[in-house]
Amino acid sequence: MKSEPSMRSCGLYVHVPFCETKCGYCDFYSVAIYERRPPEALLACLVRELRERSDQRTSPLRTVFVGGGTPTILPVEQLSELFTPLHRLAATDRVVEFTVEANPATLDDAKLAVLVDAGVDRISMGAQSFDPADLTVLERLHSPDDIAPSVALARRHGIRRLNLDLIFGIPHQTLASWQRSLERALGLEVDHIACYGLTYEPGTRLTKQLRQGRISPCDEGLAAEMYEWAVDRLSDAGYEQYEISNFARPGQQCLHNLIYWRNEDYIGAGPSAAGYVNGERYKNIADVAGYIRRIRENGRAVMESEHLTGSAAAADTLMMQLRLNEGVDAGAFISRHGDVAWRQIATCAARWERLGMVALDERRLGLTRKGRLVADAVLVELLAALDEPCAVRAPDQYPPLRILTAKV
């Protein structure tokens, strides 16, 4: 069943690939900002791509998310160069959420003034841990003492919607140290907390250390205990779990990420950025020089794209929506992908329902709390039931569902 062009609102993701240094666990595309790569040329091309893509969109923007990399590492002048056109887009389309990623100690009064003037109303901060030993293993540059002042500074500039990212399952991390980190995050009274399990991604320094025997991975049983404790503690503190790794106070869910997880349209701009518009999934080249060259030549930097149809499109929806506590809505899924695909999935899911791993009825399919601990295994079988490989990305290249996995 072919999907119809979307007339819904969509999101905009802007990838700023600059970091001060590359963290050892990170597999997102990033480069050192002053390592023979001054930002001016890239920003000019990024602004051009934004203009090209915004002129061609068929749906108004609902959310804007600027990530990376570390967008807030940009000097004030370059930050303003990027956020001026973003402000025009956000104001024209009346976006309801405008998020920027930041690391602790990369914010100051001048940068926050630029962000606020541009309409930014939400900051997602990569705290990762309040334990110095954890931050050393992760090769983070900030200290635990940088986090609270950065949160306070954002609030002084009027930004109330704040997220803290935390990582568990770090080598040498204990349940007690994880509990202390989460308690310190709760003490800052932010409205959103994301708890990601550490993964060892191919090509990262952390994975190399693991293979060389220089570090030992966290025991999976301990990591599961950390996760389950966090679910209970955050619930007790008034946070609702709405996705495998994400928790929010009522009404404070990340609307942009919900667009991803509900498999709705979003535009991606910048090196390595991905987009999904009217059934076409695309990805830009993950190289600054290549991105600049392609944008200068024709205003686009797409490295690969594919129009998702049939069971490949159904698999894409299943993969993303199963992350959510709300699960997969049967009626919407059938309307979008047909009843044959739903019957294939539901037949396979019945076995997992008997094991207590999924909840399944005529209205929805979702993971149970027990099922989230083995979600990757559930998903592999459900995808196989559709009897066709996923387009563009193989199943093992999708954002993993298992709780022992790092950030989407």
Image: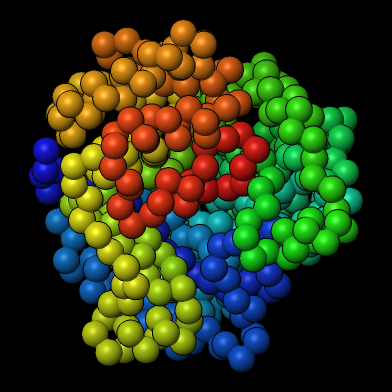
Q: Horizontal and vertical percent for residue 67? A: 51, 60
Q: Horizontal and vertical percent for residue 51? A: 26, 73
Residue 13 vertical position relative to residue 20 in the rendered view, above or below: above
Res. 387 visible in picture? yes
Q: Horizontal and vertical percent for residue 391? A: 30, 52
Q: Quadrant of residue 110?
A: bottom right
Q: Is residue 289 left or right of residue 178?
A: left
Q: Quadrant of the image for the N terminus?
A: top left
Q: Residue at x 24, y 68 (%)?
A: 53
Q: Quadrant of residue 306?
A: bottom left
Q: Quadrant of residue 231?
A: top right
Colour logic:
rainbow
Q: Residue at x 51, y 11 (%)?
A: 355
Q: Horizontal and vertical percent for residue 155? A: 62, 48
Q: Residue at x 65, y 38 (%)?
A: 404
Q: Residue at x 86, y 56 (%)?
A: 213
Of the pair 89 and 195, the residue shown nearer to us:
195
Res. 145 visible in picture? no
